[in-house]
Amino acid sequence: MEKNLKRMATMHRMQVTGLELFYKQGYYNTSIDDILKSLSLSKGAFYYHFESKEDFFISIVQSLIAQKVYSMLIEPIEGKDNPFNVIANCLEDALETAEHNELDFGFVLGNFISEFNGKNPEIMRFLKDILKIWEVNLISILQKGKSDGYVDRHVDSGGVATYLISSYMGIRTMMVEGNCKTIRYNYMQQLRQYFKMLSQKEIA
Amino acid sequence: MEKNLKRMATMHRMQVTGLELFYKQGYYNTSIDDILKSLSLSKGAFYYHFESKEDFFISIVQSLIAQKVYSMLIEPIEGKDNPFNVIANCLEDALETAEHNELDFGFVLGNFISEFNGKNPEIMRFLKDILKIWEVNLISILQKGKSDGYVDRHVDSGGVATYLISSYMGIRTMMVEGNCKTIRYNYMQQLRQYFKMLSQKEIA
DNA sequence: TGTTTTACCGACCACTTGGTTTGTTGGTGT
DNA sequence: ACACCAACAAACCAAGTGGTCGGTAAAACA
């Protein structure tokens, strides 16, 4: 067993508050000093654990964001149930989380993708990878839904997956404009109608 | 006639390249010097015309972004035709514009809303106002579509408007991830299906 | 017990930031 | 010919920025 316990603990603290501030204020608008001040740590501590600000952020993406996206948006929709139900419930949960001002990692992802787009290809790679995993997972569960008789066979799984992710990202952008509850309600309403349209048609 | 011609011209030049750089690199990641360098102008010129960086950006929002959103996303959908057709065509046009790396102002708007959310309430107000105008306009054209017999009477216009804007914002976020053409095609496909669902049902 | 190693401090560096101030200059009215 | 002023140039400033570096207390190891 490694004696890295202290090390890991400190790094993790830095990453957690780092993510919080980066998310709230933006990466470029958040200085390392900001993070260290709110942790009562010094520059020395930071550069002892991380090579650079960029390296630090990438470690956050990999150890925090990736895991959360996985546990909140991917794991919950795996199973044998009707894909439309589990997906809708999953997204509704995420939106509710978002409404309570907690970190909603689907949106965190989209937010950072906007911020780094065209500015930092290195970081973009990591972010896009996570997005891709989400997308692939949605596609596969939709495909399984077809063989299980939940999803109409003519449905374009890739198209639906893209549409789901994008509408979700977009609705989260809209939710910052206030009146979250109404927006969320409207969105879920439209989503379930959309899903009804894609469901396996009964034999007429 | 005022001799403000020179003044207006210079201000406009600053605003245009300002918007371009702010959009490409982000507001906080773009310095005034960046803008001035690419214009071969000096600090003196800038602070002669504008009070501050913030004031400068607000002037861009009001004189450039607002107008463009209006001319690209609002004016084109006014008329007596089937709202679903004109909206779909309008959004498709915007997405095509975006694909050619030109400024797509619906997305510019969403992008800045993300960047300033929680950071600058002053600027947020201006951005949200424009978004609101877009939304209200969509709602009103959908309502008119009902009386004209294009839109099913049970459709929740507000919900659809929100859904339209958000899915559009989201799809634009996705498009930065490459493969724009496929994503655009998928999106339009799903959108038109969605619209079909909301259309006036023929008397069965 | 003596010696590394770990984890951290804090002064310091070169550089950039938004913003100020003090010029300079070419056109305009008189 | 004159003063005048819009429209800019350019040096300058304080407050940050990411990053470096020498030092150090305490724990781990020998």
Image (tube, coloured by chain):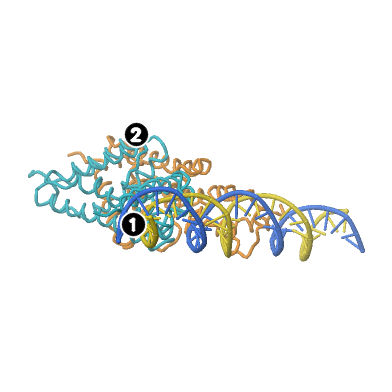
Chain colours: A cyan, B orange, C yellow, D blue
Q: Say which mark, if any, is on residue A127.
A: 1
Q: Earlier in the sequence, mark 2 or mark 1?
A: 1
Query: In x, y percent, where is residue B121?
Result: 50, 40
Task: Report, in whole angstroms, how far the alpha carbon at label 2 lies from the one at label 1.
Answer: 28 Å
Quarter containing the N terminus of chain A: bottom left
Q: Nearer the viewer, mark 2 or mark 1?
A: 1
What amino acid type should be assigned to the residue bearing mark 2? Lys
- Tell me the subunit letter for badge 1: A
Judging depth in this view, the residue of A188 and D18 nearest the camera is: D18
Q: Residues within 10 Å of mark 1 (few under 14, many from 20)?
A: many
Quarter containing the C terminus of chain A: top left
Q: Do the residues labelled 2 and 1 touch (CB within 8 Å)?
A: no
Badge 2 and badge 1 both on one subunit: yes
Query: In x, y percent, where is residue B171?
Result: 34, 53
What amino acid type should be assigned to the residue bearing mark 1? Leu
Residue tagged by mark 2? Answer: A181
Query: Going 57% across and 60% down the picture, which residue do you hit?
Result: B35
